[in-house]
Image (spheres, rainbow, N blue to C red):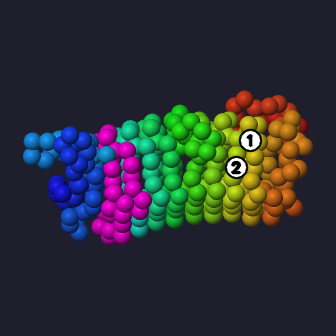
Amino acid sequence: METIDGINYDLNTPEIGEATIRGPNTTTLTEIIVPATIESGENTYSVTNIATSAFKDNTSITSIDFSGASNLKIIGQNAFYNTPVININFSGATNLVKILGNAFNNTHVTSLDFRNLVNLEQIFIYSFRFCTKLTSVNFGNNPKLIGGGTKSSQSFYFAPFDSCSNLPAIDLSNTVIENIGNNSFNSCSNLISAKLPSSLTQISNGAFYSAGLTEILIPWTVDTIVGGAFQNFVTNFVLYWDKAYKSELETYVNTAFSSTSSGLKVVYLNTTLGSLPTKLENIQAD
């Protein structure tokens, strides 16, 4: 164990040269600065992990700075669960691969920027659940965002943004996500805009359940919409759908849109979309 600037680190052997952030050594830390390396004696260790529950229930931390965390690979389960964190700077975490379950659940974070996370593969269950002050998420055009090469891994794991009730918009249009997983944006009641990528093939159960959307454009690449994906929407919901796949829509209306179907309006597009338009109102419909 090594303690530096109020943070405890577990050290592997010098031959391995890796360190894991274990947690705080004081109750007064307000900012966590994750470095690329630390020194212990004559040895240098790369900081690669933040341990499970490392800062869980801490009451003083309001800021996390990953701008120098170029060796960080994993943020552990419950790492910052139920903390008053407001600011998270991911800009230097270019080798981050996984954000594990509940890592930032029930924090006060207001914005997220994933654009520099070029090796991020998975955002796990409830990672940012109940972040009710979150108003902005920038996914950028990261080609590996939530992706690992297969359909199952290029997805949001179960409910990562569940109950982020003040998130107004998401733009996934430049990502390569294939599956929006179960309850990903469940109960995001103020989510009024969602742009989906042309790589998308599946929208899973409860993905946008009780969201605030009044309209959505489904990319022509989608071949599976699991029951409940769009349940419990507002009345007079508008669905934009490719005309070439008109017959397939009938199989989804009574399951994916079941509590919305009575007020559902479908607008069929004339051409198969190779890319998504910037704004729905600019679409030429049939």
Q: Is residue 267 visible?
A: yes
Residue 232: x and y in percent read 74, 64
Q: In the picture shown, does residue 272 fall above or below 23?
A: above
Amino acid tagged 1: Val
Q: Residue 68 vs residue 73: left or right?
A: left
Q: Quadrant of residue 81?
A: bottom left
Is 50 magenta? The answer is: yes
Sequence-first tag of 1 and 2: 2
Q: Which residue is at 27% across, 59% downward? A: 22
Magenta stretch: give its range.
49-78
- As helix, strand or loop, the secondary structure at mark 1 comes to loop
Q: Which residue is at 69% across, 31% downward? A: 275
Residue 62: x and y in percent read 33, 61
Amino acid tagged 2: Ile
Marks 1 and 2: CB-CB under 8 Å? Answer: yes
Q: Which mark is residue 203?
A: 2
Count of numbered tags: 2
Residue 196: x and y in percent read 66, 42
Label 2 Cα crowd, 10 Å radius (few <14 / some 14-19 / many 20+): many
Predominant SS of the magenta segment: loop
- As helix, strand or loop, the secondary structure at mark 2 comes to strand
Q: Which residue is at 64% across, 49% downward? A: 180
Q: Which mark is residue 222?
A: 1
Marks 1 and 2, how far apart at CA: 8 Å
Q: Quadrant of the N terminus?
A: bottom left
Closer to us: 182 or 186: 182
Residue 131: x and y in percent read 49, 62
Q: Residue 9 vs residue 230: left or right?
A: left
Q: Quadrant of residue 18?
A: top left
Is 158 magenta? The answer is: no
Label 1 Cα crowd, 10 Å radius (few <14 / some 14-19 / many 20+): some
Q: Residue 6 vs residue 192: left or right?
A: left
